[in-house]
Image: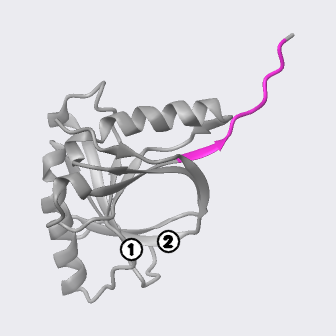
Amino acid sequence: MESGSIGSVTVREEPARTVAYLRRQGPYAGIPDAIQELMKHLTRNRLTPAGAPTGVFFTDPQKVPEAQARWEVQMPIAEHNPDEEPEGDGVGIRTIHARTVAVLVHTGPYDAVAPAYGHAVRWIDQHGYKVVGVPEEAYLSGPDTPPETIKTEIRFPVAKAPISYAT
């Protein structure tokens, strides 16, 4: 397995955004099909994509078997619709509030992205932050991109960790 390359971790402020989302359970190999399904929903409902598709991961793959993994795909949309619960096709709309995220870009195949997560978590801890939400991946490359050049942006919502004083 090729490992790819891991970029530097940076912290940035992300503005609020409206997303269409589709929640799933099961193997992560289902992400491409879920993105396709979400895109079909956007087209049918005349919603305009406004960024890269994103995978959001609610379970830890080191603690939960992949068959039981809970995740969703999101697509930022230009329209600022009010939040909507999922429809019959499972697609909902909600606002992601402004937040601070630690970010790094992994270049390489999707099946080699795991070391980037460890790198990001160590960096977060070493630089006085704490993780305050679930991780996500923005898929910056198209489906026909050669595996060795795929770019995946990994994001962790973070906050400054409280300072502790030794006594």
Compared with 110, 85 (above or below) is below
State the image quarter where residue 31 is shown: bottom left
- Residue 17 is labelled as 2
**Separation of residues labelled 1 and 2 (CA atoms):** 10 Å
The x, y position of residue 17, in whole percent, is: 50, 71
Tell me, yes or no, whether the two marked residues, 1 and 2, touch with CB atoms within 8 Å: yes
- Residue 51 is labelled as 1
Q: Is residue 57 visible?
A: yes
Q: Is residue 84 left or right of residue 80?
A: left
What amino acid type is highlighted by mark number 1? Gly
Disc 1 residue crowd, few under 14, some 14–19, many 20+, Cα 10 Å: some
The x, y position of residue 34, in whole percent, is: 17, 61
Q: Is residue 89 visible?
A: no
Compared with 15, 109 (above or below) is above
Please report the residue visible at 51 percent of the width from the left and 47 percent of the height from the top. 8
The x, y position of residue 29, in whole percent, is: 13, 48
- What range of the chain is rendered magenta? 157-166
Q: Quadrant of the N terminus?
A: top left
What secondary structure is the stretch in magenta mostly built from? loop
What is the secondary structure assignment of the residue under circle 1? loop
Please report the residue visible at 45 percent of the width from the left and 34 percent of the height from the top. 119
